[in-house]
Image (spheres, rainbow, N blue to C red):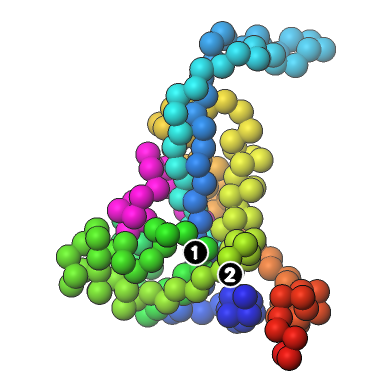
Amino acid sequence: MEDVLDLYEEPYDARRPVVCFDEKSVQLVAETRLPRPVLPGQPKRYDYEYERRGTANIFMTVEPLAGWRQVTVTERRTKLDFAAQIQQLVDVCYPEAERIRLVMDNLNTHKPASLYEAFPPVEARRLLRRLEFHYTPKHASWLDMAEIELSVLASQCLAHRIPDRDTLAGETAAWQARRNQDGIPVKWRFTVNDARQRLRHLYPENS
């Protein structure tokens, strides 16, 4: 925990950006009847019935201090999908960075081995040389600031029925563009000192 919190207290460094990464499953739901439009004194109305159309996955990448985020919609969140996100992060998002310090939870796909399953060893090693993994502790994924951004996305963009992956991709892309244009940072205030005071029960007794 303190490893991640120390990282968050460091000043902005474009050569060694701190980037948070997370994902979220989204249920795709279609209307069975057309909603009734807004009328004077009456809100838009939806039928309670709906049609399930499977799920999609959202990858969220956030650089909190820069006020930048990227949302990618995929069909699944396999090791290969994770590896593709990492390759894009290194080669497209941060081609000039010396080292990308990546914060994420301990999901079984979030491992260096995923890159070796997706790419030849030379390519996997090339990517890993540019990365520094920082994992949140078990049951402490709230330390990942990408989870905060996913919550904002859910409230502002996903609180209605979305029928298919293309619609989801279009709506999240528009949300991402607005947030990035505004340059909204994630302001993290929970420090190592806060953790030692408020979460004393998590530390060994002799610490």
Q: Is residue 153 above or below residue 19?
A: above
- Residue 116 placed where, x, y %? 25, 65
Kind of element beneath mark 2: loop
Amino acid type, residue under disc 1 in the picture: Asn
To which quarter of the image does residue 6 belong?
bottom right
Mark pair 1, 2: CA separation = 7 Å
Q: Which residue is mark 2?
A: 137
For residue 83, side relative to residue 205 (left or right): left
- Residue 158 placed where, x, y %? 59, 36
Q: Are marks 1 and 2 in contact (CB under 8 Å)?
A: yes
To which quarter of the image does residue 90 belong?
bottom left
Counting residues from the N terminus, which is met first, the one under dot 1 or under dot 2? 1
Which residue is located at x 38 percent, y 43 percent?
76
Q: Which residue is mark 1?
A: 106
Q: Give the quarter of the figure containing the N terminus.
A: bottom right
Q: Which residues are magenta?
A: 69-83
Amino acid type, residue under disc 2 in the picture: Pro
Which residue is located at x 72 percent, y 90 percent?
207
